[in-house]
Image (cartoon, rainbow, N blue to C red):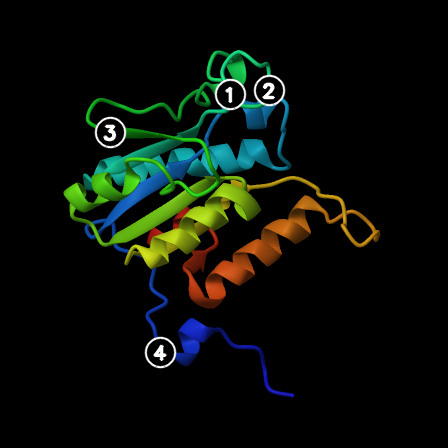
Amino acid sequence: MAAPFTLLDLAGASRMPSAWEAAALVLIDHQREYVDGKLPLTGIAAATAACGELLALARRHGSPVVHVVHHGRAGGGGAFDPESHGAAMIGGLEPLAGEHTVVKGLPNSFAGTTLAALLERLGRKELIVAGFQTHMCVSATVRSALDHGYRSTVVASACATRDLPDPLGGAPVTAAELHRISLAALHDRFATVVASPAAWG
């Protein structure tokens, strides 16, 4: 049987990570809910550190930075209530002056937000993407980015997720397995997945 291959490889697409000079960094849902809130993620400390490395790289190269944050229903006490601790950005990952913040209410960061218009103004046609959760908002956003004409690079170590129940009644799907499979699916057609910020040397 032939070795597995991706659709992007079949098409001869570049697998080089996006150059900082051509890209905008999009950090998704780097919020306290995933650290010590209602949805703690496996490996969040290491992933947060990797997000910090990406922010430092973007700032060093003068690349645009877009912080995407999720807001749920206000005042209801649910996840990402904008009035709660969980909606706050993780310490050390907050925007600096001149960086952009987009608020969303759905997994896809383009849906019902200003992201598409903002990226068009920034004039970058490539995205470097990281954040939370791998299988949810990262995946939904990267898939939509292709529809909007963007080439994406996803940084694996700067993403994280959580265990999920198996809808077919089997053993729970572990966070590590879900993370790996979600990235493999994106790498097939929607993005180039790199292991860590070390991809940029």
Mark 2 closeness class: few <14, some 14–19, many ≥20 residues within 10 Å: few
What residue is drawn where x is 44% and y is 66%?
189
- Compare marks 2 and 3 and give the one earlier in the sequence: 2
Q: Which residue is mark 3?
A: 99
Contact (Cβ within 8 Å) of mark 1 with mark 3: no
Contact (Cβ within 8 Å) of mark 1 with mark 2: yes
Say which of marks 2 and 3 sits in front.
Answer: 2
Q: List x then y, in percent, for residue 20.
A: 24, 49
State how far apart marks 3 and 4 are (Cα): 34 Å
Q: List x then y, in percent, for residue 30.
A: 46, 30
Tell me which amino acid carries mark 4. Answer: Gly
State how far apart marks 4 and 1 are (Cα): 44 Å
Q: List x then y, in percent, for residue 57.
A: 30, 40
Q: Which residue is mark 4?
A: 12
Q: Nearer the viewer, residue 84 or 27?
A: 84
- Compare marks 1 and 3 and give the one earlier in the sequence: 1
Tell me which amino acid carries mark 1. Answer: Arg
Contact (Cβ within 8 Å) of mark 2 with mark 4: no
In screen coordinates, is 104 left or right of 119? right
Contact (Cβ within 8 Å) of mark 2 with mark 3: no
In screen coordinates, is 64 left or right of 53? left
What residue is drawn where x is 37% and y is 78%?
11
- Compare marks 2 and 4 and give the one earlier in the sequence: 4
In the displayed structure, 88 sits above or below 63; it is: above
Q: Nearer the viewer, residue 175 or 149?
A: 149
Tag 1, which secondary structure?
A: loop
Q: Nearer the viewer, residue 195 or 150?
A: 150
In the displayed structure, 168 sits above or below 10; it is: above
Contact (Cβ within 8 Å) of mark 3 with mark 4: no
